[in-house]
Amino acid sequence: MPTNADAAELFRGIADVLDVLGERFKPEAYRRAARSIESLTEGLADVAARGDLRTIPGVGDAIEEKIREYLGTGRLDYYDRLQKEVPPGILTLLRIPGLGPKTARRFWLELGVEGPAELADAIQQHRLDGVKGFGPKKIEQIRVALAAAAGAPAAARLPIEVATAIAQRLVAGLRAAGGVEQIELAGSFRRGRETVGDLDILVTSADPERIFDAFSRLPDVGEVKLRGGTKETVVLRGGLQVDLRVVEPAAFGAAWQYFTGSKDHNVRLRSLARDRGLKINEYGVFRGEERVGGRTEQEVYGTLDLAWIPPELREDRGEIDAAAKGPLPPLVERTDLVGDLHLHLPPGAGARDVDQLVATARARKLSYLGLVVARVEPDASRSTLSTAVLDRLDSVKSAGLTIVRAVEAGADGIPAEWAKLRHDYVIVRPTAAQAEPPTSARTPFGAALVAHVGGEESGRRWVAWARSQGAAVEVGPGPDRLDSTGARTAREARVPLVLPTGVDRQEDDPTCPVALGFARRAGAGPSDVRNTAPVAEITAAWSKKRRA
Protein backbone atom coordinates (compact mmCIF):
# COMPACT_ATOMS: atom_id res chain seq x y z
CA MET A 1 0.00 0.00 0.00
CA PRO A 2 1.48 3.40 -0.96
CA THR A 3 2.38 5.58 2.02
CA ASN A 4 1.52 9.25 2.56
CA ALA A 5 5.10 10.13 1.59
CA ASP A 6 4.78 8.16 -1.66
CA ALA A 7 1.56 9.95 -2.60
CA ALA A 8 3.03 13.37 -1.76
CA GLU A 9 6.09 12.64 -3.91
CA LEU A 10 3.84 11.56 -6.79
CA PHE A 11 1.88 14.82 -6.75
CA ARG A 12 5.08 16.87 -6.55
CA GLY A 13 6.29 15.00 -9.62
CA ILE A 14 3.06 15.88 -11.44
CA ALA A 15 3.50 19.54 -10.47
CA ASP A 16 7.06 19.56 -11.83
CA VAL A 17 6.06 18.09 -15.17
CA LEU A 18 3.16 20.53 -15.46
CA ASP A 19 5.61 23.38 -14.82
CA VAL A 20 7.85 22.05 -17.60
CA LEU A 21 4.82 22.00 -19.90
CA GLY A 22 4.04 25.62 -19.06
CA GLU A 23 0.83 25.15 -17.07
CA ARG A 24 0.14 28.22 -14.93
CA PHE A 25 -2.20 27.22 -12.09
CA LYS A 26 -2.32 23.42 -11.94
CA PRO A 27 1.22 22.92 -10.54
CA GLU A 28 0.47 24.83 -7.34
CA ALA A 29 -2.78 22.88 -6.88
CA TYR A 30 -0.87 19.59 -6.92
CA ARG A 31 1.86 20.94 -4.64
CA ARG A 32 -0.75 22.11 -2.16
CA ALA A 33 -2.32 18.65 -2.17
CA ALA A 34 1.14 17.12 -1.67
CA ARG A 35 1.82 19.33 1.36
CA SER A 36 -1.55 18.48 2.89
CA ILE A 37 -1.07 14.74 2.37
CA GLU A 38 2.42 14.85 3.86
CA SER A 39 1.16 16.59 7.00
CA LEU A 40 -1.70 14.13 7.65
CA THR A 41 -1.62 12.48 11.07
CA GLU A 42 -3.21 9.29 9.71
CA GLY A 43 -2.82 7.07 6.68
CA LEU A 44 -4.21 8.34 3.37
CA ALA A 45 -5.80 4.93 2.80
CA ASP A 46 -7.72 5.26 6.08
CA VAL A 47 -9.03 8.68 5.05
CA ALA A 48 -10.09 7.26 1.68
CA ALA A 49 -11.82 4.28 3.33
CA ARG A 50 -13.97 6.68 5.38
CA GLY A 51 -14.83 8.69 2.27
CA ASP A 52 -13.17 11.81 3.72
CA LEU A 53 -10.56 12.60 1.05
CA ARG A 54 -12.36 15.85 0.21
CA THR A 55 -11.73 17.10 3.76
CA ILE A 56 -7.98 17.27 2.98
CA PRO A 57 -7.03 20.86 2.05
CA GLY A 58 -6.37 21.13 -1.68
CA VAL A 59 -8.15 17.88 -2.62
CA GLY A 60 -11.05 18.39 -5.01
CA ASP A 61 -12.90 16.02 -7.32
CA ALA A 62 -10.05 15.54 -9.81
CA ILE A 63 -7.33 14.95 -7.23
CA GLU A 64 -9.60 12.71 -5.14
CA GLU A 65 -10.12 10.50 -8.19
CA LYS A 66 -6.38 10.33 -8.77
CA ILE A 67 -5.68 9.45 -5.12
CA ARG A 68 -8.15 6.57 -5.29
CA GLU A 69 -6.58 5.28 -8.51
CA TYR A 70 -3.10 5.47 -6.99
CA LEU A 71 -4.14 3.75 -3.75
CA GLY A 72 -5.86 1.01 -5.72
CA THR A 73 -3.22 0.31 -8.37
CA GLY A 74 0.03 1.80 -7.11
CA ARG A 75 0.33 3.93 -10.24
CA LEU A 76 -1.41 6.83 -11.96
CA ASP A 77 -2.25 6.84 -15.66
CA TYR A 78 -2.38 10.67 -15.72
CA TYR A 79 1.23 10.93 -14.52
CA ASP A 80 2.37 8.28 -17.00
CA ARG A 81 0.77 10.25 -19.87
CA LEU A 82 2.25 13.55 -18.67
CA GLN A 83 5.77 12.13 -18.61
CA LYS A 84 5.44 11.07 -22.26
CA GLU A 85 4.85 14.71 -23.23
CA VAL A 86 8.41 15.76 -22.33
CA PRO A 87 11.75 14.23 -23.36
CA PRO A 88 13.01 11.68 -20.81
CA GLY A 89 16.19 13.67 -20.33
CA ILE A 90 14.19 16.65 -19.09
CA LEU A 91 12.91 14.53 -16.20
CA THR A 92 16.53 13.64 -15.42
CA LEU A 93 17.41 17.35 -15.38
CA LEU A 94 14.80 17.89 -12.66
CA ARG A 95 16.90 15.74 -10.33
CA ILE A 96 20.00 17.93 -10.74
CA PRO A 97 20.53 20.12 -7.63
CA GLY A 98 19.66 23.75 -8.37
CA LEU A 99 17.66 23.05 -11.54
CA GLY A 100 13.93 23.54 -11.09
CA PRO A 101 11.20 22.69 -13.62
CA LYS A 102 10.90 26.23 -14.97
CA THR A 103 14.64 26.39 -15.65
CA ALA A 104 14.47 22.98 -17.34
CA ARG A 105 11.63 24.32 -19.53
CA ARG A 106 13.77 27.28 -20.61
CA PHE A 107 16.65 25.00 -21.56
CA TRP A 108 14.28 22.83 -23.57
CA LEU A 109 12.42 25.56 -25.44
CA GLU A 110 15.08 28.28 -25.77
CA LEU A 111 18.21 26.17 -26.28
CA GLY A 112 16.87 22.84 -27.51
CA VAL A 113 18.49 21.08 -24.53
CA GLU A 114 16.73 17.83 -23.70
CA GLY A 115 18.98 16.23 -21.10
CA PRO A 116 22.11 16.48 -18.90
CA ALA A 117 24.61 15.61 -21.66
CA GLU A 118 23.18 18.25 -24.00
CA LEU A 119 23.21 20.83 -21.20
CA ALA A 120 26.86 20.07 -20.46
CA ASP A 121 27.63 20.52 -24.18
CA ALA A 122 25.73 23.83 -24.23
CA ILE A 123 27.82 25.10 -21.31
CA GLN A 124 31.07 23.98 -22.94
CA GLN A 125 30.03 25.72 -26.18
CA HIS A 126 29.19 28.94 -24.22
CA ARG A 127 25.58 28.85 -25.42
CA LEU A 128 24.37 29.98 -21.97
CA ASP A 129 26.63 33.03 -22.02
CA GLY A 130 24.51 36.17 -22.14
CA VAL A 131 21.22 34.31 -21.57
CA LYS A 132 19.05 36.33 -19.18
CA GLY A 133 19.25 35.01 -15.63
CA PHE A 134 22.46 33.01 -16.21
CA GLY A 135 25.55 34.86 -15.09
CA PRO A 136 29.02 33.28 -14.91
CA LYS A 137 28.55 32.14 -11.31
CA LYS A 138 25.18 30.47 -12.02
CA ILE A 139 26.59 28.73 -15.10
CA GLU A 140 29.54 27.42 -13.10
CA GLN A 141 27.21 26.10 -10.39
CA ILE A 142 25.20 24.20 -13.01
CA ARG A 143 28.38 22.81 -14.58
CA VAL A 144 29.63 21.52 -11.22
CA ALA A 145 26.22 20.04 -10.34
CA LEU A 146 26.08 18.21 -13.69
CA ALA A 147 29.58 16.82 -13.20
CA ALA A 148 28.77 15.64 -9.68
CA ALA A 149 25.50 14.02 -10.79
CA ALA A 150 27.30 12.18 -13.60
CA GLY A 151 29.93 10.87 -11.20
CA ALA A 152 27.78 9.59 -8.37
CA PRO A 153 24.13 8.80 -7.58
CA ALA A 154 22.22 11.22 -5.38
CA ALA A 155 22.55 10.41 -1.70
CA ALA A 156 19.47 9.07 0.06
CA ARG A 157 17.93 11.09 2.88
CA LEU A 158 19.47 10.22 6.21
CA PRO A 159 17.59 9.62 9.47
CA ILE A 160 18.05 12.74 11.55
CA GLU A 161 19.75 10.81 14.36
CA VAL A 162 22.47 9.81 11.87
CA ALA A 163 22.70 13.34 10.46
CA THR A 164 22.96 14.73 14.01
CA ALA A 165 26.19 12.87 14.70
CA ILE A 166 27.63 14.10 11.38
CA ALA A 167 26.55 17.69 12.00
CA GLN A 168 28.08 17.67 15.48
CA ARG A 169 31.45 16.51 14.07
CA LEU A 170 31.44 19.17 11.34
CA VAL A 171 30.57 22.01 13.72
CA ALA A 172 33.15 20.85 16.27
CA GLY A 173 35.80 20.61 13.55
CA LEU A 174 35.10 24.15 12.32
CA ARG A 175 35.17 25.55 15.85
CA ALA A 176 38.47 23.83 16.58
CA ALA A 177 40.03 25.28 13.42
CA GLY A 178 39.58 28.82 14.75
CA GLY A 179 38.35 31.98 13.07
CA VAL A 180 34.67 31.20 13.71
CA GLU A 181 32.71 33.94 15.46
CA GLN A 182 29.22 32.44 15.23
CA ILE A 183 28.13 29.09 13.78
CA GLU A 184 24.65 27.58 13.42
CA LEU A 185 22.91 24.78 11.53
CA ALA A 186 19.90 25.55 9.36
CA GLY A 187 17.66 23.70 6.87
CA SER A 188 15.40 20.74 7.55
CA PHE A 189 17.90 19.59 10.18
CA ARG A 190 17.15 22.63 12.32
CA ARG A 191 13.42 22.14 11.79
CA GLY A 192 13.74 18.63 13.26
CA ARG A 193 12.55 16.71 10.20
CA GLU A 194 12.73 12.93 10.55
CA THR A 195 15.08 12.67 7.56
CA VAL A 196 17.68 15.05 6.16
CA GLY A 197 18.66 15.40 2.49
CA ASP A 198 21.57 17.80 3.05
CA LEU A 199 23.05 20.08 5.70
CA ASP A 200 23.29 23.88 5.79
CA ILE A 201 25.87 25.57 8.04
CA LEU A 202 26.08 29.34 8.58
CA VAL A 203 29.16 31.06 9.94
CA THR A 204 30.29 34.60 10.67
CA SER A 205 34.02 35.16 10.32
CA ALA A 206 36.48 37.89 9.39
CA ASP A 207 38.43 35.36 7.28
CA PRO A 208 36.14 33.29 4.99
CA GLU A 209 39.06 31.68 3.14
CA ARG A 210 40.42 30.29 6.40
CA ILE A 211 37.01 28.79 7.17
CA PHE A 212 36.71 27.23 3.71
CA ASP A 213 40.23 25.78 3.90
CA ALA A 214 39.49 24.25 7.29
CA PHE A 215 36.14 22.89 6.11
CA SER A 216 37.56 21.17 3.02
CA ARG A 217 40.21 19.44 5.18
CA LEU A 218 37.76 17.88 7.66
CA PRO A 219 37.95 14.05 7.71
CA ASP A 220 34.28 13.65 6.69
CA VAL A 221 34.68 15.72 3.50
CA GLY A 222 35.14 13.69 0.32
CA GLU A 223 34.90 16.27 -2.47
CA VAL A 224 34.65 20.05 -2.84
CA LYS A 225 31.99 20.71 -5.47
CA LEU A 226 31.88 24.50 -5.40
CA ARG A 227 33.83 27.26 -3.72
CA GLY A 228 33.65 30.96 -4.23
CA GLY A 229 32.64 34.21 -2.61
CA THR A 230 30.74 33.36 0.54
CA LYS A 231 29.79 29.72 -0.13
CA GLU A 232 31.44 26.34 -0.26
CA THR A 233 29.60 23.14 -1.19
CA VAL A 234 31.09 19.75 -0.36
CA VAL A 235 30.01 16.14 -0.60
CA LEU A 236 30.87 14.02 2.42
CA ARG A 237 32.38 10.57 2.07
CA GLY A 238 28.97 9.05 2.78
CA GLY A 239 27.35 11.07 -0.04
CA LEU A 240 25.64 13.81 1.99
CA GLN A 241 25.92 17.31 0.51
CA VAL A 242 26.77 20.18 2.88
CA ASP A 243 26.55 23.90 2.08
CA LEU A 244 28.72 26.23 4.19
CA ARG A 245 28.00 29.94 3.99
CA VAL A 246 29.96 32.78 5.56
CA VAL A 247 27.54 35.59 6.39
CA GLU A 248 28.08 39.14 7.61
CA PRO A 249 26.86 39.70 11.21
CA ALA A 250 24.31 42.35 10.16
CA ALA A 251 22.54 39.76 7.99
CA PHE A 252 23.06 36.62 10.09
CA GLY A 253 19.50 36.47 11.45
CA ALA A 254 18.01 36.94 7.99
CA ALA A 255 20.25 34.24 6.50
CA TRP A 256 19.52 31.85 9.37
CA GLN A 257 15.79 32.35 8.94
CA TYR A 258 15.94 32.08 5.15
CA PHE A 259 18.04 28.92 4.98
CA THR A 260 16.09 27.24 7.79
CA GLY A 261 12.90 27.36 5.70
CA SER A 262 10.62 25.71 5.05
CA LYS A 263 9.96 26.86 1.49
CA ASP A 264 6.23 27.26 2.13
CA HIS A 265 6.87 29.22 5.33
CA ASN A 266 9.25 31.57 3.54
CA VAL A 267 6.86 32.14 0.65
CA ARG A 268 4.24 33.33 3.15
CA LEU A 269 6.76 35.67 4.81
CA ARG A 270 7.75 37.22 1.47
CA SER A 271 4.09 37.80 0.69
CA LEU A 272 3.58 39.56 4.03
CA ALA A 273 6.67 41.67 3.36
CA ARG A 274 5.36 42.77 -0.04
CA ASP A 275 2.07 43.80 1.54
CA ARG A 276 4.05 46.13 3.82
CA GLY A 277 6.21 47.58 1.07
CA LEU A 278 9.20 45.51 2.21
CA LYS A 279 11.49 42.96 0.61
CA ILE A 280 12.83 40.01 2.60
CA ASN A 281 15.67 37.70 1.58
CA GLU A 282 18.81 36.05 3.01
CA TYR A 283 20.52 39.44 3.29
CA GLY A 284 17.91 41.15 5.43
CA VAL A 285 14.60 42.98 5.38
CA PHE A 286 14.65 46.03 3.12
CA ARG A 287 12.54 49.09 2.50
CA GLY A 288 13.85 50.20 -0.83
CA GLU A 289 17.64 50.11 -0.48
CA GLU A 290 17.57 50.53 3.30
CA ARG A 291 18.05 47.41 5.43
CA VAL A 292 15.57 47.65 8.30
CA GLY A 293 16.20 44.26 9.90
CA GLY A 294 18.25 41.10 9.68
CA ARG A 295 20.81 40.88 12.48
CA THR A 296 18.60 38.44 14.42
CA GLU A 297 15.64 36.24 13.56
CA GLN A 298 13.53 38.12 16.09
CA GLU A 299 14.29 41.30 14.15
CA VAL A 300 13.21 39.67 10.87
CA TYR A 301 9.87 38.50 12.26
CA GLY A 302 9.38 41.76 14.17
CA THR A 303 9.52 43.87 10.99
CA LEU A 304 6.49 41.87 9.82
CA ASP A 305 4.65 42.38 13.12
CA LEU A 306 5.11 38.71 13.98
CA ALA A 307 6.30 37.03 17.14
CA TRP A 308 9.38 34.83 16.71
CA ILE A 309 8.41 31.34 15.49
CA PRO A 310 10.34 28.26 16.69
CA PRO A 311 12.04 26.54 13.71
CA GLU A 312 10.26 23.21 14.29
CA LEU A 313 6.92 24.90 13.52
CA ARG A 314 7.95 26.63 10.28
CA GLU A 315 5.94 24.51 7.84
CA ASP A 316 3.10 26.93 6.96
CA ARG A 317 0.58 25.04 9.06
CA GLY A 318 -0.97 28.06 10.76
CA GLU A 319 2.08 29.18 12.73
CA ILE A 320 2.31 32.53 10.90
CA ASP A 321 -1.31 33.45 11.61
CA ALA A 322 -0.77 32.47 15.25
CA ALA A 323 2.39 34.61 15.50
CA ALA A 324 0.47 37.61 14.16
CA LYS A 325 -1.70 37.48 17.29
CA GLY A 326 1.21 37.48 19.75
CA PRO A 327 3.87 35.21 21.25
CA LEU A 328 3.32 31.50 20.61
CA PRO A 329 2.89 29.12 23.55
CA PRO A 330 6.30 27.86 24.71
CA LEU A 331 7.46 24.52 23.38
CA VAL A 332 9.07 21.93 25.60
CA GLU A 333 12.80 22.48 26.26
CA ARG A 334 15.44 20.01 27.41
CA THR A 335 15.67 21.87 30.71
CA ASP A 336 11.97 21.15 31.33
CA LEU A 337 12.74 17.41 31.68
CA VAL A 338 13.16 16.76 35.40
CA GLY A 339 13.24 12.97 35.32
CA ASP A 340 13.53 9.90 33.11
CA LEU A 341 10.88 7.18 33.12
CA HIS A 342 12.46 4.50 30.92
CA LEU A 343 16.04 3.51 31.75
CA HIS A 344 17.86 0.18 31.44
CA LEU A 345 21.02 -0.86 33.21
CA PRO A 346 23.46 -2.88 31.06
CA PRO A 347 23.42 -6.71 31.24
CA GLY A 348 25.26 -7.96 34.28
CA ALA A 349 25.07 -4.53 35.93
CA GLY A 350 26.33 -4.12 39.45
CA ALA A 351 26.28 -1.51 42.20
CA ARG A 352 28.98 0.51 40.41
CA ASP A 353 26.72 0.93 37.35
CA VAL A 354 23.94 2.21 39.59
CA ASP A 355 26.31 4.72 41.21
CA GLN A 356 27.55 5.97 37.83
CA LEU A 357 24.01 6.49 36.53
CA VAL A 358 22.99 8.27 39.72
CA ALA A 359 26.05 10.55 39.54
CA THR A 360 25.24 11.49 35.93
CA ALA A 361 21.60 12.16 36.82
CA ARG A 362 22.64 14.48 39.64
CA ALA A 363 25.12 16.27 37.38
CA ARG A 364 22.31 16.87 34.89
CA LYS A 365 20.03 18.07 37.69
CA LEU A 366 17.39 15.34 37.32
CA SER A 367 15.20 14.61 40.34
CA TYR A 368 14.07 11.04 39.58
CA LEU A 369 14.98 7.98 37.55
CA GLY A 370 12.60 5.26 36.40
CA LEU A 371 14.62 2.04 36.13
CA VAL A 372 13.42 -1.17 34.53
CA VAL A 373 13.96 -3.91 37.11
CA ALA A 374 12.48 -6.73 35.01
CA ARG A 375 11.67 -7.13 31.35
CA VAL A 376 10.39 -9.56 28.75
CA GLU A 377 13.10 -9.83 26.08
CA PRO A 378 12.30 -9.89 22.33
CA ASP A 379 12.95 -13.66 22.28
CA ALA A 380 10.30 -14.08 25.03
CA SER A 381 12.94 -14.80 27.70
CA ARG A 382 12.76 -12.82 30.93
CA SER A 383 15.39 -10.98 32.90
CA THR A 384 15.43 -9.35 36.33
CA LEU A 385 18.05 -7.15 37.96
CA SER A 386 20.18 -8.89 40.56
CA THR A 387 19.36 -8.69 44.25
CA ALA A 388 22.55 -6.66 44.83
CA VAL A 389 21.45 -4.06 42.28
CA LEU A 390 17.92 -3.90 43.69
CA ASP A 391 19.34 -3.38 47.17
CA ARG A 392 21.58 -0.61 45.87
CA LEU A 393 18.59 1.09 44.23
CA ASP A 394 16.81 1.08 47.59
CA SER A 395 19.75 2.85 49.20
CA VAL A 396 19.81 5.75 46.72
CA LYS A 397 17.72 8.38 48.45
CA SER A 398 20.02 11.34 48.90
CA ALA A 399 20.54 14.70 47.18
CA GLY A 400 16.92 14.91 46.11
CA LEU A 401 17.09 11.96 43.69
CA THR A 402 14.23 9.44 43.75
CA ILE A 403 14.39 5.98 42.16
CA VAL A 404 11.13 4.51 40.89
CA ARG A 405 10.81 1.00 39.51
CA ALA A 406 9.26 -0.23 36.29
CA VAL A 407 8.68 -3.63 34.75
CA GLU A 408 8.57 -3.92 30.96
CA ALA A 409 6.21 -6.45 29.41
CA GLY A 410 3.82 -7.03 26.57
CA ALA A 411 0.26 -5.77 26.56
CA ASP A 412 -1.06 -9.13 27.69
CA GLY A 413 0.19 -8.51 31.23
CA ILE A 414 3.19 -9.15 33.43
CA PRO A 415 4.46 -12.71 34.04
CA ALA A 416 3.03 -14.47 37.08
CA GLU A 417 6.45 -14.80 38.73
CA TRP A 418 6.69 -11.02 38.88
CA ALA A 419 3.54 -10.69 40.99
CA LYS A 420 5.55 -10.11 44.16
CA LEU A 421 8.26 -8.03 42.49
CA ARG A 422 7.93 -4.49 43.78
CA HIS A 423 7.34 -2.00 40.99
CA ASP A 424 5.65 1.37 40.58
CA TYR A 425 4.44 1.16 36.98
CA VAL A 426 4.47 -0.96 33.84
CA ILE A 427 6.11 -0.09 30.54
CA VAL A 428 4.13 -1.69 27.77
CA ARG A 429 6.34 -2.84 24.90
CA PRO A 430 4.24 -4.62 22.26
CA THR A 431 5.86 -7.76 20.91
CA ALA A 432 5.88 -8.83 17.26
CA ALA A 433 2.81 -10.92 17.99
CA GLN A 434 0.99 -7.88 19.39
CA ALA A 435 0.66 -5.71 16.28
CA GLU A 436 -2.80 -4.75 17.50
CA PRO A 437 -3.59 -3.42 20.98
CA PRO A 438 -5.84 -5.46 23.26
CA THR A 439 -9.58 -5.02 22.84
CA SER A 440 -10.08 -5.08 26.59
CA ALA A 441 -11.14 -1.75 28.03
CA ARG A 442 -8.74 -2.21 30.96
CA THR A 443 -5.20 -3.44 31.33
CA PRO A 444 -4.52 -6.75 33.06
CA PHE A 445 -2.04 -4.92 35.30
CA GLY A 446 -2.32 -1.97 37.64
CA ALA A 447 -0.91 1.14 35.99
CA ALA A 448 0.58 1.36 32.48
CA LEU A 449 2.48 4.60 32.34
CA VAL A 450 4.37 4.27 29.08
CA ALA A 451 3.19 2.57 25.92
CA HIS A 452 6.35 1.72 23.92
CA VAL A 453 4.96 1.76 20.39
CA GLY A 454 5.99 2.61 16.84
CA GLY A 455 5.09 2.62 13.16
CA GLU A 456 2.67 4.99 11.49
CA GLU A 457 -0.28 2.62 11.28
CA SER A 458 0.12 0.64 14.51
CA GLY A 459 1.22 3.76 16.36
CA ARG A 460 -2.17 5.43 15.94
CA ARG A 461 -3.96 2.38 17.30
CA TRP A 462 -1.63 2.11 20.28
CA VAL A 463 -2.06 5.82 20.99
CA ALA A 464 -5.82 5.27 21.14
CA TRP A 465 -5.26 2.30 23.47
CA ALA A 466 -2.92 4.35 25.67
CA ARG A 467 -5.59 7.01 26.00
CA SER A 468 -8.11 4.40 27.17
CA GLN A 469 -5.63 3.28 29.86
CA GLY A 470 -4.47 6.71 31.00
CA ALA A 471 -0.99 5.80 29.73
CA ALA A 472 1.69 7.91 28.10
CA VAL A 473 3.61 7.21 24.88
CA GLU A 474 7.32 7.41 24.14
CA VAL A 475 8.68 9.73 21.47
CA GLY A 476 12.08 9.43 19.88
CA PRO A 477 14.22 7.98 17.10
CA GLY A 478 14.03 4.32 16.27
CA PRO A 479 11.43 1.92 14.85
CA ASP A 480 9.54 1.39 18.11
CA ARG A 481 8.95 5.00 19.16
CA LEU A 482 6.73 7.70 17.77
CA ASP A 483 8.10 10.38 15.44
CA SER A 484 6.69 13.91 15.12
CA THR A 485 3.58 12.72 13.27
CA GLY A 486 2.85 10.16 15.96
CA ALA A 487 3.57 12.72 18.66
CA ARG A 488 1.07 15.10 17.07
CA THR A 489 -1.52 12.33 16.98
CA ALA A 490 -0.95 11.64 20.69
CA ARG A 491 -1.05 15.31 21.62
CA GLU A 492 -4.30 15.86 19.72
CA ALA A 493 -5.73 12.85 21.58
CA ARG A 494 -4.50 14.36 24.88
CA VAL A 495 -2.20 11.44 25.52
CA PRO A 496 0.91 12.54 27.47
CA LEU A 497 4.32 12.14 25.88
CA VAL A 498 7.46 10.77 27.51
CA LEU A 499 10.88 11.93 26.27
CA PRO A 500 14.29 10.36 26.91
CA THR A 501 16.78 12.54 28.78
CA GLY A 502 19.87 10.73 27.50
CA VAL A 503 21.13 10.36 31.09
CA ASP A 504 22.16 6.77 30.34
CA ARG A 505 24.08 7.79 27.19
CA GLN A 506 27.07 9.86 26.17
CA GLU A 507 26.60 13.63 26.29
CA ASP A 508 26.68 13.89 22.47
CA ASP A 509 24.21 11.04 21.88
CA PRO A 510 21.43 12.30 19.55
CA THR A 511 18.52 10.41 21.15
CA CYS A 512 17.38 13.19 23.47
CA PRO A 513 17.69 16.16 21.06
CA VAL A 514 16.02 14.22 18.25
CA ALA A 515 13.12 13.17 20.49
CA LEU A 516 12.83 16.74 21.73
CA GLY A 517 12.69 17.98 18.13
CA PHE A 518 9.91 15.51 17.30
CA ALA A 519 7.86 16.68 20.28
CA ARG A 520 8.40 20.34 19.40
CA ARG A 521 7.37 19.71 15.76
CA ALA A 522 4.17 18.27 17.23
CA GLY A 523 3.63 21.56 19.10
CA ALA A 524 4.20 19.99 22.53
CA GLY A 525 4.67 22.29 25.49
CA PRO A 526 5.94 21.30 28.94
CA SER A 527 2.46 20.32 30.12
CA ASP A 528 2.16 17.81 27.25
CA VAL A 529 5.19 15.84 28.48
CA ARG A 530 4.80 13.63 31.54
CA ASN A 531 8.40 13.67 32.72
CA THR A 532 8.38 17.44 33.15
CA ALA A 533 6.19 16.91 36.23
CA PRO A 534 7.55 16.19 39.74
CA VAL A 535 7.71 12.53 40.64
CA ALA A 536 5.27 13.04 43.54
CA GLU A 537 2.62 14.22 41.08
CA ILE A 538 3.22 11.19 38.86
CA THR A 539 3.20 8.62 41.68
CA ALA A 540 -0.01 10.12 43.03
CA ALA A 541 -1.60 9.49 39.63
CA TRP A 542 -0.33 5.90 39.68
CA SER A 543 -1.81 5.32 43.14
CA LYS A 544 -5.14 6.77 42.05
CA LYS A 545 -5.22 4.51 39.00
CA ARG A 546 -4.49 1.44 41.10
CA ARG A 547 -7.33 2.27 43.46
CA ALA A 548 -9.64 2.70 40.50
Image (spheres, rainbow, N blue to C red):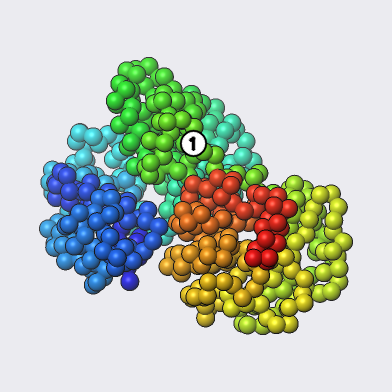
Residue 244 drawn at (x, y percent)? 47, 41
How many numbered marks are there?
1
Q: Residues within 10 Å of mark 1 (few under 14, many from 20)?
A: some
Q: Nearer the viewer, residue 274 or 150?
A: 274
Q: Nearer the viewer, residue 210 or 514?
A: 514
Left or right: 93, with 286 as reference point: left
Residue 247 drawn at (x, y percent)? 48, 31
Q: Nearer the viewer, residue 217 or 172?
A: 172
Residue 152 drawn at (x, y percent)? 38, 59
Left or right: 332, with 485 as reference point: right
> Residue at horizontal 69%, vertical 71%?
407
Q: Is residue 292 above or below residue 392?
A: above
Image quadrant holding the C terminus, namely bottom right
Displayed quadrant of residue 420: bottom right
Image quadrant holding the N terminus, namely bottom left
Q: Is residue 212 above or below residue 440?
A: above
Displayed quadrant of residue 348: bottom right
**Residue 104 in view here:** no
> Residue at horizontal 49%, vertical 36%?
328
As shown in the figure, which amino acid type bears the numbered disc 1? Leu
- Which residue is farthest front? 548
Instruction: Identify the residue under disc 1.
Output: 328
> Residue at horizontal 24%, vertical 63%?
67
> Residue at horizontal 49%, vertical 39%?
310
Q: Nearer the viewer, residue 100 or 489?
A: 489
Residue 209 drawn at (x, y percent)? 51, 34
